[in-house]
Amino acid sequence: MVTVNIDSRGTACPGPLTDIIRAYKKASNGDILVVMATDPGIKADSKSWCDRTKNQLVDVKEKNGEYTVTIKITGKS
Amino acid sequence: MKRILIVGGGAGGLITANKLAQDLSVELKKEEISISVIDPAVYHEFQPGYIGIAFKGEKPEAMRRHVSSLILRGINLIPEKCARIIPEENKIVTGSGRNMSYDYLVVGTGCEPDYSQIDGLSRDNLDYHTSAEKSANLYRAVSSMKTGKIVVGIAGLPYKCPPSPNEAALLLDEFFTRSGLRERVSINFVTPYIRIYPAEPINEVIEPLFRERNIEMSTGFTVDRIDTAGKKVISLEGDEIPYDTLMLVPPHKPGDFLKGQDFTDEDGWIKTGKTDLHISTYENAFAIGDVTNIPISKAGVEAHLEGIVVGENIVSDITGNNVKALFTGRTQCSMETGYGKATFVIGTYTKPVLKLSPSKDKYIMKKMMEAMYWDALMGRTEAIFKAYFGDDYIQYQSRPVRAPA
């Protein structure tokens, strides 16, 4: 299991989701993606994306306009 | 003599070279500076034109010109590849092993489709992102198709020209509707994003068109591989979409010579300052266009505006003007939506993408901008661009002060 930190701060939609999808492509089931973002759209987008791709949204934290989204990769066949 | 070396003769490299030749014409004439463009390509192709070739049968010959006809007098054109950049030594090494030193470096080597990332894709895919010739092959295939399942969309990230997969789906719908074959041809649009167009404001105007035109939408579908024997696109989650004809945009990669360098990321994209466009920490080296790791659209307008910013800063450095130009992150991607209409994806680093409905006016504007392309590369349209882009054209950190004559 690997934890991958992704810094998407300062990028607007779809920047953070692009970073998530690119990291997902290289990840394995069980890996954790930790995404930092400033685009508020990340909150809803990461949930929708996890629902569609059968991955697990573990946590979304917000502090001073910065979001930290934790995703566990579970969707790969 | 100050030596300015531009690696790459694409949309960004050519406007940078031509802007420098215009703004530093006196210095160039006095041989106080040299401007060299290194690129092995004989022809420059108008890449946004690939869509028109592939889906509307436009002529490839109109989309290409000899590179030597697109540079101003005084610019050296070096028909070689760049094999290595060594910024700590202010030099590059060419494909033939020649060392070339520089005082200023601009890298605009672009990116290209990388079929190796998706197993099976190169065997069955029809391509409208590699060349005018391949785009013409796609049109021939579409023209001979009478029935079947088309899968169109995004095979991987990142890729050039973000609206192009949407345009492809909409123009295919128009083509087969006009041919009277639409009921016999299904179109399925696949995307790893959760919306048909990733930016919500544009998605709001595009998704209803997909529904109206009966284009199937497979969102959150991250392509893993192509089963060419079974004619299926397979996602990372194991979902399958059958196809008869495949037209996916492959993921793109930067030039292989960039991989494994200190100034590039793990995939070879150049670590580039978002606004000052410096390569990593190198004050005299810049990257522009698709080759950067800047998280914006990989498209010609961005490369052009970045080239203007870099040109402005090199001119400022050489002439001693008190100006620091910054790139605003402005995007201006046109999206043809079929039946003579288009919209634009417009935003900056600080302004979210606008919600602009497709219209005939925007289609005419898109066509006007396309008609200006060759002159734009030569730097002949900057007055128009300045007026059109307004504050988004360039942001200045300090006001320009003209150097003494």
Image: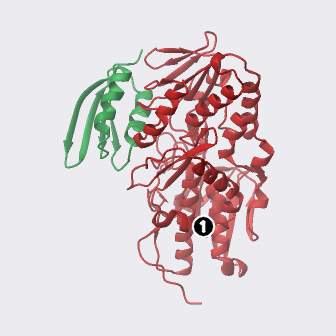
Q: Quadrant of the N terminus of chain B?
A: bottom right
**Above-or-below relation of B284 to B60:** below
Determine the residue positioned at 30% across, 34% down.
A44
Q: Nearer the viewer, residue B90 or B277?
A: B277
A62 on left or right of B1: left
In the image as oriented, which residue stretches furthest toward the bottom?
A: B405
Residue at mark 1:
B384
Q: Give x and y (percent) for residue B69.
A: 79, 60
Q: Secondary structure at mark 1?
A: helix
Q: Is residue A74 left or right of residue B62?
A: left
Q: Quadrant of the C terminus of chain B?
A: bottom right
Q: Residue B247: which quarter of the image?
A: top right
> Visible in this render: residue B318?
yes
Type of the residue with mark 1: Ile
| Whole-percent x, y for residue B124 in the image | 67, 21
Q: Considering depth in this image, is A67 or B106 the residue closer to the camera?
A: A67
Q: Is residue B310 visible?
A: no
Q: Horizontal and vertical percent for residue A56? A: 29, 23
Check the image and report above or below for B387 versus B118. below
Q: Chain of mark 1?
A: B
Q: Which chain is in green here?
A: A
Q: Residue at coordinates 58% horizontally, 21% vertically from top-left? A: B119
In this picture, residue B328 sits left or right of residue B379:
left
In this rendering, position of residue A27 left or right of residue B8: left
* Classed neighbour count for the residue bearing mark 1: other residues with Cα under 10 Å, few (<14), some (14–19), many (≥20): few
Q: Quadrant of residue B250?
A: top right
Give me the residue at 40% from left, 40% from top. Answer: B200
Residue B176 in the image: x percent, y percent? 68, 26
- Chain letter for red? B
B54 or A1, nearer to the observer = B54
